[in-house]
Image (cartoon, coloured by chain):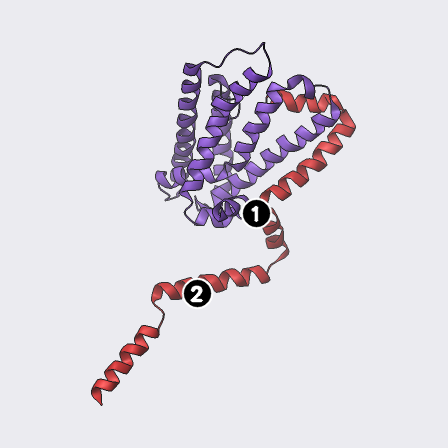
Chain colours: A red, B purple
């Protein structure tokens, strides 16, 4: 009877997650939670940090179109001078 | 390939994970495009450009590597003074993850320098290239701020301090890079 109990407890312990695994699960849950519960500031933060090129090129396109309309080639030539050319 | 897309699209996660291979790949390619591809392209495109000099190529490549290590050292020193505990080796392994825009910028610079006459005084081409250049700059700044938050683990006012101080150092290093012949700074 004792032996059966011991075997049973070994099996039970083996099935339990280790501390490392528990940490991983917690991190995963927190990450998922942050995905769904977001304040406006956090949403803007995520808009910028996830796919950063999307935000960068979007802003840049607005800037380029506006400045080219206002100053024409004087502006684009200045950009060339600054960034190599 | 997955880690490439992670570095491209999810920089925060990529700084948390280890992506050493991507780092070395990005840094090496940025340096090589600057030092090997650019002179070759200029040489092949026009007869007035000089034949690439192998010593010049080796020298600029060496300066590129030095410049990468220098910017990591700047990060390490400044952030250590501001109370960060990150090791120098971590910076060397992770700063390269912000090199996607630098890599693309060195491509754009190579073409805009070589085919300069096409783009000068042309508003359509000029507008397109200014979208590219300014966009890459904004992208790099975003990655720079994320890097300060994630790798340096600085908070509040200190992150602004570090941003300004390291920003000035980066500008100085960029001028030095231009002086030794690297048209896109390896920073």
Q: Quadrant of residue A72?
A: top right
Chain identity of mark 2: A
Residue occupying the point 50% across, 37% down: B163
| Viewport quadrant of the N terminus of chain A | bottom left
Residue in the foreground of this view, choosing between B72 and B104: B104
Question: Image height check: is B10 above or below B43?
Answer: below
The secondary structure type at the circle numbered 2 is helix
Q: Residue furthest right?
A: A69
Instruction: State whether residue B151 appears in this view.
Output: yes
Residue occupying the point 51% across, 60% down: A31
Residue in the foreground of this view, choosing between B92 and A45: B92
Q: Horizontally, is B108 left or right of B175 in the view?
A: right
Report x, y in % for residue B77: 38, 34
The secondary structure type at the circle numbered 1 is helix
Chain identity of mark 1: A
Report the disc number at residue A25. Answer: 2
Earlier in the chain: of badge 1 and badge 2, it is 2
Residues indicated by labels 1 and 2 sit on the same polypeptide chain: yes
Q: Horizontally, is A18 left or right of A34 in the view?
A: left
Residue occupying the point 40% across, 63% down: A23
Instruction: State whether residue B187 appears in this view.
Output: no
Q: How many marks on residues?
A: 2
Q: Which residue was labeled with disc 1?
A: A49
Report x, y in % for residue B98: 50, 38
Residue in the foreground of this view, choosing between B86 and A75: A75
Report x, y in % for residue B176: 47, 21
């Amino acid at each position: 009877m004792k032996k059966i109990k011991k075997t049973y407890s070994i099996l039970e312990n083996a099935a339990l997650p280790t501390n490392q695994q528990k940490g991983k699960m917690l991190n995963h849950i927190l990450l998922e939670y942050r995905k769904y519960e977001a304040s406006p500031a956090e949403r803007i933060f995520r808009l910028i940090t996830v796919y950063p090129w999307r935000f960068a090129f979007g802003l840049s396109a607005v800037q380029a179109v506006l400045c080219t309309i206002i100053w024409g080639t004087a502006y684009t030539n200045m950009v060339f001078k600054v960034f190599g050319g | 390939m997955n880690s490439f897309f992670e570095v491209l699209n999810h920089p925060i996660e990529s700084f948390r994970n280890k992506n050493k291979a991507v780092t070395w790949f990005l840094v090496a390619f940025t340096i090589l495009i600057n030092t090997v591809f650019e002179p070759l392209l200029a040489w092949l495109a026009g007869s007035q450009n000089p034949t690439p000099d192998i010593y010049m190529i080796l020298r600029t490549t060496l300066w590129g590597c030095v410049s990468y290590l220098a910017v990591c050292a700047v990060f390490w020193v400044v952030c250590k003074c501001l109370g960060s505990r990150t090791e120098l080796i971590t910076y060397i392994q992770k700063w390269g993850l912000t090199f996607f825009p630098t890599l693309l910028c060195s491509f754009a610079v190579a073409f805009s320098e070589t085919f300069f006459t096409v783009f000068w005084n042309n508003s359509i081409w000029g507008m397109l290239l200014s979208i590219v250049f300014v966009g890459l700059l904004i992208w790099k700044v975003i990655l720079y701020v994320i890097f300060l938050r994630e790798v340096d683990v600085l908070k509040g006012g200190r992150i602004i301090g570090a941003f300004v101080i390291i920003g000035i150092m980066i500008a100085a290093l960029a001028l030095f890079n231009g002086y030794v012949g690297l048209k896109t700074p390896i920073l």
